[in-house]
Image (cartoon, helix red, strand yellow):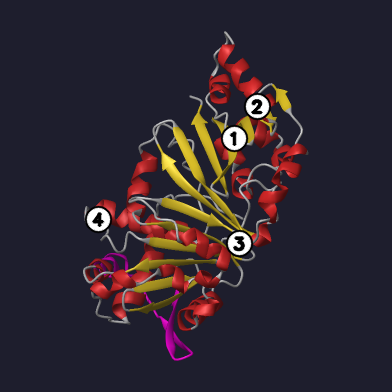
Amino acid sequence: MRLRTIAKLGMVLSVVLFCTAVGFYGFTKLSMTDKSKDINLFSLVPADGCIGVLESDNISFFLNEVSQQNYSEELSHFRFPGLFNYVLGGLNEYTTNTAHGLSSKMNHVLVSFHVSGSSRDQVVYFRMGDSDGATLNNMLQAYAPQGFAPKKEKYKGKQIYIYPLADGDFLAVYSEAGFFAASYQKNLIEQVIDAKEDKEKALLSDPVFSEIMQKKKSHKFLTLYGRTSSMPFLQSNTRCWSEFDFHLNSDVVYLAGDTFVADTCNLECMPEVLRQIPDVCEDSVVISANKETMARYMDEACERNNRTLFNECVANLSHEAVFMLVADMDKVAREPERFTSYLPLFLLENASLFRSFILSEQLSVVNGRISHITVLTYKD
């Protein structure tokens, strides 16, 4: 899954956001009411070919939060490619320049990622409140490109607007009362319409994914849902969904959550699978799924006179876990093939951007669920 994070800003981003603004304000002219609070954006996400979804109820908080951490410079190039960058970058730029801020509804955003996982195979979804029309109209006036000429197309009685972009690309937009969706791919917007009209085609109909949605989220959350195992050695990606809740502080990035599987066989087979994992204890890498070995590694790290940050990361792990991995991300970046069984693909693909961190990862079984926590600790 090619998922990277948060955007640099620029005029191209503004132009793309302007196009989405026109899609909502200039042509649909919808009356937004408080009914928008009842819209579940996941009911718009097409199930077919969906490999991941990013959700936040307060995206502007996280855009601002990342920039204030000690590691912000190191992660300045860590981003989700494609439409996510353009729209979220444009929003952040506009609201920063105008000191206007996003409404609570528009702050709730989804980005769905689809096969083949390229930067173009994405859909961005926003809730819209009645005050957002004026905001988008102001964007229209501020960023209107010369010779703007949208094209209208019908699909199953719904209007899709196709907008030319300054770079020669096109943006497809579909909106109704309370929301809009935008994508580079018109066929993905057609699938959004299909999902809205037929619940069986929406991601919420996936029985494994729907288990994740039963969990309550706290305020100000950023969560990545992936059709992937948090620990690839445990199961294939086709029959599971994992959640990764992001939490930030000045020196640490936390990713925590559960992996949901289609049947209980994975839990029953876990002890046998874990026994196949070799113990590793070497410079900058510790791996084990053996309870006694893990306890020894932690105790030794705690007792060492040389209390390096790496040793502290080992010593601070939980004795209740069934799997542990601690690795300097610089080593992971140089030897990624060694870690393909232990790390989700989106972390491996961005390993070089995390060279300034030490990764600590643990796996536990809690109330019949496979729970995971990944901690990235800043070295400088």
Residue position for label 3 = 118
Residue position for label 1 = 321
Which mark lies nearer to you, 3 or 2? 2
Q: Are marks 4 and 1 in contact (CB under 8 Å)?
A: no
Callout 3, which amino acid? Answer: Ser
- Mark with earlier residue (3, 2): 3
Residue 28 spot, x, y in % from top left: 32, 82
Magenta stretch containing residue 155, yes or no? yes
Residue shown at 69% from the left, 50% from the top: 268
Residue position for label 4 = 101
Q: Which of 369 and 283 is in front in this view?
A: 369
Residue position for label 2 = 294
Residue 108 spot, x, y in % from top left: 35, 61
Between the residue at mark 1 and the residue at mark 2, the CA separation in whole angstroms equals 9 Å
* Region of the chain picked out in magenta, as a range: 138-164
Quadrant of res 352: top right
Left or right, 370 with respect to 32, comes to: right
Q: Do the residues labelled 3 and 1 touch (CB within 8 Å)?
A: no
* Disc 4: CA contacts within 10 A as few (<14), some (14-19) or many (>=20): some
**Secondary-structure class at tag 2:** helix
Callout 1, which amino acid? Answer: Ala
Residue 195 spot, x, y in % from top left: 50, 78
Which mark lies nearer to you, 4 or 1? 1
